[in-house]
Image (tube, rainbow, N blue to C red):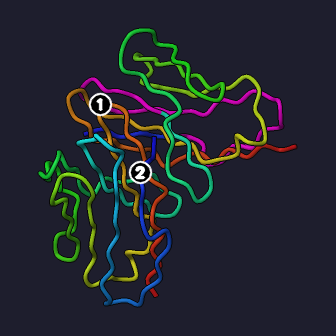
């Protein structure tokens, strides 16, 4: 079985400051890793994914994440945030060969003007 | 390209009443998922379809929940009877390739 831990339930950040949202996972098998964003009253939108290859993954809206196998982490970063980045961010994993996604509990990112 | 469509967006019912949610996936997506999202939590898979076949329904509470995807396209999720604890957002997603699930806007259910 897989599990995902998002260490921060809420992260307030000033506009134009950098941000890192932390994600750690546990799995006995190799996994794919994802970050999704959920804006208020909307469904989830895929930000980026790691399937294989380079451990630094770039996604939409200027976000990137780095897969660290030894630390079983997949932290999400953005060098300069905007008001429009205010949303809930979910980290998720799925085992190789199985499309079942296991989500973390989410991190609410609030941008302070 | 149209996204995943869900209806209704909001539903308020009294406990013990039945309720149904509808989902139309992205055209050509063979895999369809229903998720339950409680307040402050991440989505949890209820059921996954490959075309018409339910390939993973281990998390679906079968005493009151049922789902169907008769023609391998759109799908319906039903709860009968609803309980107070069923209040949540019900999300539908679809995918064509592994690792890329596209989510609909969800149906927010309130059971009173």
Q: Position of residue A52 (x, y in %)?
A: 36, 15
Name the residue: 29% across, 30% down. Answer: B97
Q: Is residue A8 left or right of residue B45?
A: right
Q: Position of residue B66 (x, y in %)?
A: 20, 70
Marks 1 and 2 sit apart, C-alpha to C-alpha, by: 15 Å
**For this rendering, which residue is in front, A51 or B54?**
B54
Disc 2 crowd rating (10 Å Cα; few below 14, some 14-19, many 20+) is: many
Identify the magenta region.
A6-34
**For this rendering, which residue is in front, B59 or B73?**
B73
**For this rendering, which residue is in front, A67 or A39?**
A39
**For this rendering, which residue is in front, A43 or B69?**
B69
In magenta stretch: residue A11: yes
Per the image, the residue denoted by label 1 is: B97
How many numbered circles are shown? 2
Q: Earlier in the sequence, mark 1 or mark 2?
A: 2
Mark 1 in CB contact with mark 2 (< 8 angstroms): no
Residue A11's image quarter?
A: top right
- On the same chain, marks 1 and 2? The answer is yes
Label 1: chain letter = B
Label 2: chain letter = B
In magenta stretch: residue B93: no
Residue B89's image quarter?
A: bottom left
Per the image, the residue denoted by label 2 is: B4
| Mark 1, secondary structure of its residue | loop
Q: Position of residue A27 (x, y in %)?
A: 30, 31
Residue B13's image quarter?
A: bottom left
In front: mark 1 or mark 2? 2
């Amino acid at each position: 079985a897989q599990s995902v831990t998002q260490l921060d339930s809420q992260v307030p950040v000033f506009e134009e400051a950098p941000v890192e949202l932390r994600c750690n996972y546990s799995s006995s098998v190799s996994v794919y890793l994802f970050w999704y964003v959920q804006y208020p009253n909307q469904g989830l939108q895929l930000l980026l994914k790691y399937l294989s290859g380079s451990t630094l993954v770039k996604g939409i809206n200027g976000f990137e994440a780095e897969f660290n196998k030894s630390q079983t982490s997949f932290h999400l970063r953005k060098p300069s945030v905007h008001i429009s980045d205010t949303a809930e961010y979910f980290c998720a994993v799925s085992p190789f060969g199985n499309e079942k996604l296991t989500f973390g509990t989410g991190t609410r990112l609030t941008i302070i003007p | 390209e149209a996204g995943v469509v869900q209806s209704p967006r909001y539903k308020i019912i009294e406990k013990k009443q039945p309720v149904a949610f509808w989902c139309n996936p992205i055209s050509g997506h063979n895999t369809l998922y229903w998720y339950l999202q409680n307040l402050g939590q991440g989505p949890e898979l209820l059921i996954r379809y490959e075309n018409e076949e339910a390939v993973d329904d281990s998390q679906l509470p079968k005493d009151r929940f049922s789902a169907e995807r008769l023609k391998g396209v759109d799908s319906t999720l039903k709860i009968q009877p609803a309980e107070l604890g069923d209040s949540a957002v019900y999300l539908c997603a679809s995918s064509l390739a592994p690792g890329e699930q596209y989510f609909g806007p969800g149906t927010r259910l309130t059971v009173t």
